[in-house]
Image (cartoon, helix red, strand yellow):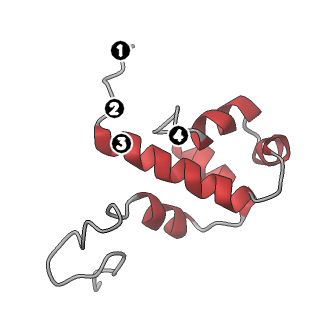
């Protein structure tokens, strides 16, 4: 299977995801978190360092659960515009939800 190269946006989202997971892990060891989430420590290391910018959803969900993060919080963090770039749409603040 041939994988297409990642876009700069995908790479940036992967870096934000890795930073979020590192912050949420705090003082816990990478090994403990990985084992609790049932992922390999190498997989967690690659995600945290941005080497795996687009991990599978079940992996993200398992890590978020172990780290006490809601999937909404993960989504908001990795899809936020770059700091200082302004809102994605005129008239809306970054992170503001659309009315249902």
Query: Of callouts 2 and 4, which one flags the residue occurring earlier in the amino acid sequence?
Result: 2
Camera-side mark, 3 or 1 = 3
Apparent side of residue 21 relative to residue 13 in the rendered image (left or right): right
Query: Of callouts 1 and 4, which one flags the residue occurring earlier in the amino acid sequence?
Result: 1
- Mark 2 is surrounded, within 10 Å at the Cα level, by few (under 14), some (14 to 19) or many (20 or more) other residues, namely few
Query: Of callouts 3 and 1, which one flags the residue occurring earlier in the amino acid sequence?
Result: 1
Camera-side mark, 3 or 4 = 3
Residue furthest front as drawn: 84
Separation of marks 3 and 2 at Cα, in angstroms = 6 Å
Check disc 3 and report its element: helix, strand or loop: helix
Residue that numbered label 2 is attached to: 6
Q: Is mark 1 in CB contact (under 8 Å) with mark 4?
A: no
Residue 91 appears at what percent x and percent y? 16, 84
Query: Of callouts 3 and 4, which one flags the residue occurring earlier in the amino acid sequence?
Result: 3
Residue 22 appears at what percent x and percent y? 66, 53
Q: Which mark is residue 2?
A: 1
Residue at point 33%, 81% (across, down) = 96
Q: Which mark is residue 56?
A: 4
Check disc 4 and report its element: helix, strand or loop: loop
Separation of marks 3 and 1 at Cα, in angstroms = 17 Å
Check disc 1 and report its element: helix, strand or loop: loop
Residue that numbered label 3 is attached to: 10
Q: Is mark 3 in CB contact (under 8 Å) with mark 2?
A: yes
Residue 44 appears at what percent x and percent y? 67, 39
Residue 31 appears at what percent x and percent y? 83, 40
């Amino acid at each position: 299977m041939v994988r297409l190269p990642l876009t700069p946006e995908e790479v940036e989202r992967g870096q934000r995801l890795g930073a979020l997971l590192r912050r949420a892990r705090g003082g816990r060891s990478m090994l403990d978190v990985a084992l609790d989430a049932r992922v390999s420590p190498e997989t967690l290391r690659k995600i945290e360092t941005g080497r795996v910018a687009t991990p599978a959803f079940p992996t993200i969900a398992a890590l978020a659960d172990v780290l006490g993060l809601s999937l909404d919080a993960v989504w908001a963090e990795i899809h936020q515009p770059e700091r200082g770039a302004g809102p994605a749409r005129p008239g809306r603040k970054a992170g503001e939800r659309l009315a249902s």
